[in-house]
Image (cartoon, rainbow, N blue to C red):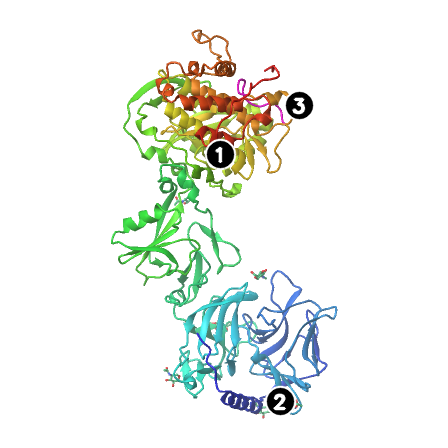
Amino acid sequence: MQPKMVPVSVFLLLLLSFVVVVVCAQSNGTRISTGSSLVAGSSSVQAWRSPSDDFAFGFRNVDNNNDDLFLLAIWFYKVPENNIVWFAKEKDNNPVFAPRGSKIELTASSGLVLRNGNGGEIWKSKPITASVAFGSMKDTGNFVLVDSINGSIWESFSYPTDTLLPTQKLEVDGVLSSRKSQGNFSLGKFQFRLLRDGNAVLNTINLRSGFPYDAYYISNTYDSASSQNSGLQVIFDEQGFLYVLKRNGEQSNITQPSVGNPVEAYYYRATMNFDGVLGVSSYPKGIDGDANGSWKDLFRIPDNICLSNENPIGRLGSGICGFNSICTLKSNGRPICNCAQGYSLVDPNDELGNCKPYITQSCDEEQEGAGNFNQNLYELVDLPNTNWPMYDYERFSTLNEQVCKSSCLEDCFCVLAVFGGSDCWKKRLPLSNGRQDASITAVSFLKLRKNVSLESFPDADRTVKKQRTLIIVMSALFGSSVFIIFILLGFKCLGLFVLKKEKLAETCTKNVFSECNLIQFTFMDIYKATNGFKEEIGRGSCGIVYKGTTEAGDIAVKKLDRMFEADRDKEFRTEMNVIGQTHHKNLVRLLGYCDEGSNRMLVYQFMSNGSLSSFLFNGDPKPSWKLRTRIAFEIARGLLYLHEECDTHIIHCDIKPQNILLDEDYNAKISDFGLAKLLKVDQSRTETGIRGTKGYVAPDWFRSSPINAKVDVYSYGVLLLEIICCRRNVETELGDGEREEGMILTDWAYDCYEKGRVEALIEGDMEAMDDFHRVERFVRVAIWCIQEDPSKRPTMEKVMLMLAGNVDVSVPPCPYPFSSMV
Ligand SMILES: *[C@@H]1O[C@H](CO)[C@@H](O)[C@H](O)[C@H]1NC(C)=O
Ligand SMILES: *[C@@H]1O[C@H](CO)[C@@H](O)[C@H](O)[C@H]1NC(C)=O
Ligand SMILES: *[C@@H]1O[C@H](CO)[C@@H](O)[C@H](O)[C@H]1NC(C)=O
Ligand SMILES: *[C@@H]1O[C@H](CO)[C@@H](O)[C@H](O)[C@H]1NC(C)=O
Ligand SMILES: *[C@@H]1O[C@H](CO)[C@@H](O)[C@H](O)[C@H]1NC(C)=O
Ligand SMILES: *[C@@H]1O[C@H](CO)[C@@H](O)[C@H](O)[C@H]1NC(C)=O
């Protein structure tokens, strides 16, 4: 709105007449002579009272938690509570808090001067243009400083805080500011202002910048055609009637004339309440001290504050309540703000403030499953009669509520959908202007993370069952125990894998532990799900792994071992912290954990196709070469993520086929971070005891030199050869005599490579033979990876590029130039 300028002469004329009125209206007041003073917290002179004792001026302790902090205030002396009508404030409308011992003194030169106990000036009445003759506490509640000739030179009525008293006026640019809450006098976010264009408005402000948002009430006393029709003053008259006086002398009523509360028998006040309602209220006179009365709202503006800014011009701010909060009108006509379900107050003491989500939705999660992952994690809660007008990011027409709901559920930006009439509006954070009211016909659907219970974890893979031929194969999962799994043979559709370079840009989520979306399971939850830990599916590095079944799908529960008693605490936390922060499609996802007394368990996604070990070594014929190459890429991808892309760089230390699991679609996922060695950024090497599994452990471990991520590269090299050959590096099982007895795969592979007999490695594998160039490239990469000298091994990123054929792979040197002792 453009401020409307008034002809200066008219303005001066009116100003002059106002001064005259004030001088004439000098009613009786208590005369306070210069040199008088009051001390905060002093027991002697309490206050300067008006002749009728209706008002008092002095110090008030208003902080229940701090007896030593005072406001310099004016209050209804006979009203026991909620009686402060004015207090000294800064230019920015914040109250001036005075410590105990502060002194207010009336001086001739500066008027009222407030000093702290040490004499430092905290505040003074400004501006003082003439010598002050005396002060006067009026029966109107106005404290006036008077000079000897011209009368009033400063008065409290000209510097209102949140209250107008009868006969008080608000001039153009005048403002009433709400306090933070009923008991907290700090500056609140609501204002009642008379704008230069003549409109009296209610608006919220940004408390940091002071920026005023759009009005939620407008008096409409702005007339563009004739400035004479626009508002000049807001007047709260002797009768307790609030109106805008226009320049042409007309009244524009803000409240209606009150009936039944005669001004002789009642105190009146107009207050910019802390909850945003401008109210005129009354209190029966003649009830002294310990009396019975209470402030009664006579008028409230606006009628329904929650619905008040239905069509504001601009689009800034949170509305009446904070962001993500919902405004509801109580029966007393005052609003109450409640955080939407799943959200909580940022500042628990500020009920009108912003709410924060417990869990922030992440689009990264969508990559986890077959596209509909989000749907398995989130649900929509109906909020009837609730609307969040404006601030949509998307809108479309549909008559079908279900379409509106699914559209939000499937969209990782959407946190709320509003369905009304034939439209669906989608909202993202933060939500603003939330309101609930019986008159609202729209329904809101609030997207919430599914409840923290066993039924709620995601299992997207399960939802897409594909028709495939099944054969049953005996196999070992996680290394030792025997477990029956189903191996799917319909690989036709899996040969489409192409390494996309963009995929390298996947990022870690940086959630801190408390926010990393882990579900906390109870022991009973897990006990039930695993049917009393009945089905053991493997033994990991520090505990036994059990299969569990829930309505939402299967889980793998790793029960941490008692043998690790001493280390368990540390190990548990390590694993939790690390895995909680890692989200990548080539890492097994930790769904949650259980931490009840001595029961510590980790709950993972269940991988229906078991480990890479059983996949590679137990199949006859060998698994598809194309699928194996894809798996090799995926493991490399997962390792690259661990090494380079997380905030906390992670060395796995135990890369082996038993620790690579395959999901329903044979996506490879690295598991078991139990031995993971944390490596802070900038710390590329770390001292540690030997970790890992024979056959995959890099020779670095046996030297005194520190360990770095290259140990994983070594293990990966071994693994890559195993993937190429479908053969264990070290055959431990007996009765495998048909293979080349006692031969270490790495030695044999290099031998074959050196002698130009790479085809021996893939004997009988027709599919691989047809792709011989790739086989040869892979073998070279593997030999680079198993170099005895860690500095010769490539990084995982380089490995990725070499595997994909994006960079040439040079001829690798002999991996063990100094006849190693491994
Ligand atoms: C001021 O007090 C005098 C007596 O002290 C009284 O006659 C007069 O009416 C009072 N004026 C007002 C405006 O109250
Ligand atoms: C009274 O007001 C006039 C003009 O407004 C001013 O010139 C004069 O200095 C004032 N007198 C005192 C004592 O303040
Ligand atoms: C009043 O609110 C402010 C701002 O939220 C806060 O800093 C202050 O501690 C509160 N004071 C009291 C007495 O609660
Ligand atoms: C405004 O209030 C006055 C009484 O002060 C009343 O006479 C008048 O009718 C009111 N106007 C409207 C439009 O309500
Ligand atoms: C308190 O108010 C009630 C009515 O609101 C009245 O009946 C009662 O007498 C009052 N008590 C006192 C002590 O004033
Ligand atoms: C979610 O879980 C909490 C605590 O476990 C429970 O109080 C609440 O009622 C649950 N909510 C729903 C919608 O099931």
Crowd tier of the residue under label 3, counting other residues whose Cα lies within 10 Å: few below 14, some 14–19, many 20 or above? few
Residue range of the region highlighted in magenta in the rendering: 688-696
Quadrant placement of the N terminus = bottom left
- Secondary structure of residue under mark 1: strand
The answer to whether residue 531 shows anywhere in this view is no
Quadrant placement of the C terminus = top right
Under mark 3, the amino acid is Ser
Q: Which residue is mark 2?
A: 151
Q: Residue at x 59, y 34 (%)?
A: 679
Is residue 692 part of the magenta span, yes or no? yes
Work out how far the residue at label 2 is from the one at label 3, CA to CA, in angstroms: 92 Å
Ligand 4 shows up in the quarter that is: bottom left
- In percent of width and height, residue 794 lies at 54, 28
- In percent of width and height, residue 493 lies at 31, 29
Crowd tier of the residue under label 1, counting other residues whose Cα lies within 10 Å: few below 14, some 14–19, many 20 or above? many
Q: Residue at x 63, y 30 (%)?
A: 686
As drawn, 704 above or below 450: above
First in residue order: circle 2 vs circle 3: 2
Q: Residue at x 33, y 58 (%)?
A: 385
Is residue 266 part of the magenta span, yes or no? no
Q: Which residue is mark 1?
A: 594
Under mark 2, the amino acid is Gly
Overall secondary structure of the magenta stretch? loop
The part of the image, by quadrant, that contains residue 311 is bottom left
Under mark 1, the amino acid is Cys
Q: Which residue is mark 3?
A: 704
The answer to whether residue 449 shows anywhere in this view is yes
Q: Residue furthest left?
A: 399
